[in-house]
Amino acid sequence: MPLSPLNEAPALSAPQGVPTPQVKPPPAAQLDSVAGHKNMLQLIHLRWLAVGGQIATIAVASLVLDLPLPMPQMLEVLACLIAFNIASHLRWHEQREVSNTELFVALLVDVASLTAQLYLSGGTTNPFVFLYLLQVILSAVLLEAWSTWTIVGITTACLAGLTLLSRPLALPLDHNQGLASLYVQGLLICFVLNAILLVTFMTRIHRNLQVRDARLADMRQQAAEHEHIVRMGLLASGAAHELGTPLSTLAVILGDWRRMPEFKGNPDLLEEINDMEIQLQRCKSIVSGILLTAGETRGEESEETTLSAFLETLVQDWRLTRPHAPLAYQATFPNDLPMVADSAVRQMIDNVLDNAMEASPQGLTLQARHDGEELTLEVLDQGPGFAPGMLQQIGKPYQSSKGRLGGGLGLFLVVNVARSLGGTVSARNRPEGGAVVTLKLPLGALTLDDNTSL
């Protein structure tokens, strides 16, 4: 989409016969998998805590309480859990995306490990049986509905099975002793452990899901803005076709006037004809740029140039078509770089300059510099600056301080073209007065490699 001076464009509607563009929805599944990648790390951390907790519990039960436990079998289950967690950690580093199925399998392994340890240590008489609730709650947050209900069914079946099949745990029947009872102490430890783990890891998981939702909302907003620009591109391309004929007719008429005796002998009229031809040439350049960006080159070809030459030519052309707006140009380049003259980039910069000129007709400044990786362009004006509310709405369509219908499209187009190149646009007010709009564009999207040629 070209950035012709559309700063005060009226509200537009799609003409008849022009198809409505279809924009693909944001890849929500991809965002879910990225959030799943972060949540898988939380499960890995939780599993390491489970390993440490099991080792501590087995040590206390056998060494301090002198309870008879099937130590070899319990250590085998523990070794399997450690091996699975190591494999999960390696897989987490190698692959960024994690699906619902993988999270489901990981939780199933945790349920199986817990069931095996409970089977070997008393079944439902073991106070740590309530750790099943931790698995159910985690599944409710992390998994899809079918996976969550499957976990609920499996944990219920495991709990029921442990009432029938388990190795008894030699705990004294001292429930009436209150906190002096080993079973009651185990229940208290299990409750505190569940509470701490849930608060800690649910907070982290919730934060991951919030980041995912924020990114999804941002991508939907970008998709809507892209569709808006595509519609404007269709309309602008149609308008360019319609304007081509009258502009050519005006050029012929001005040429005829220049040769007429009534005009040749009048210097004032000749000067006005010169101004009209300059503005007409500007209009034809805008039309050509629109069609060029739309894929209709009208015979023009891309030209290989350099970054310095591109900006100097842009400044010269802008000064020529806006002779009453003083523009100072400052460039600080450690080295010049080859690039292809891009119509969209040219008109993007022109649009920022046009906005600054309207706010500061007494003069403005364009500063350019690069650090080898990023081109930074700053447009400084001497106007009243942006209102605080406008600074928060930079790049939003129809957000303008000019108070006219269609205002705000100029910077909206600038922001979206910069975003398509991987760059950013920001604005701020200067303490000494006026405003500055900063464009940052990656040089990789603008310049040519050594092996690239047109």
Image (spheres, rainbow, N blue to C red):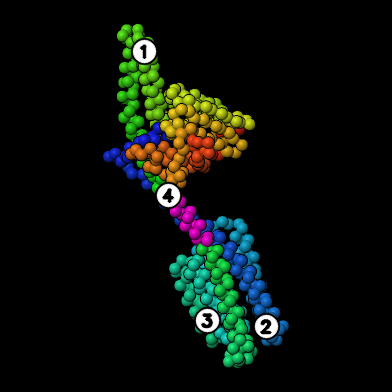
In the image: residue 407, left or right of residue 373: left
**Tag 4: residue type?**
Gln
User: Label 3: how many residues lie within 10 Å, few (<14), some (14-19) or many (20+)?
Assistant: many
SS for tag 3? helix
Q: For the magenta stretch, what is the residue range?
A: 207-221
**What residue does disc 3 label?**
159
**What residue does disc 4 label?**
221
Q: In which quarter of the image is residue 271?
A: top left
Q: Which of marks 1 and 3 is in front?
A: 1
In the image: residue 263, left or right of residue 446: left
Q: Is the magenta stretch mostly helix, strand or loop?
A: helix
SS for tag 1? helix
As measured in the structure, the alpha-carbon distance from the residue carrying label 4 to the one carrying label 3 is: 47 Å
Can residue 166 be seen from the camera position used here? no
Front-lying residue, 404 or 122: 404
Q: Which residue is drawn at 34% across and 38% down?
A: 404
**What residue does disc 1 label?**
268
**What residue does disc 2 label?**
61
Q: Does the segment drawn in magenta span residue 418?
A: no
Q: CB of mark 4 within 8 Å of CB of mark 3? A: no
Q: CB of mark 4 within 8 Å of CB of mark 2? A: no
As measured in the structure, the alpha-carbon distance from the residue carrying label 2 to the one carrying label 3 is: 22 Å
User: Label 1: how many residues lie within 10 Å, few (<14), some (14-19) or many (20+)?
Assistant: few
Q: Which of marks 1 and 2 is in front?
A: 1
Of mark 4 and mark 2, the one earlier in the sequence is 2
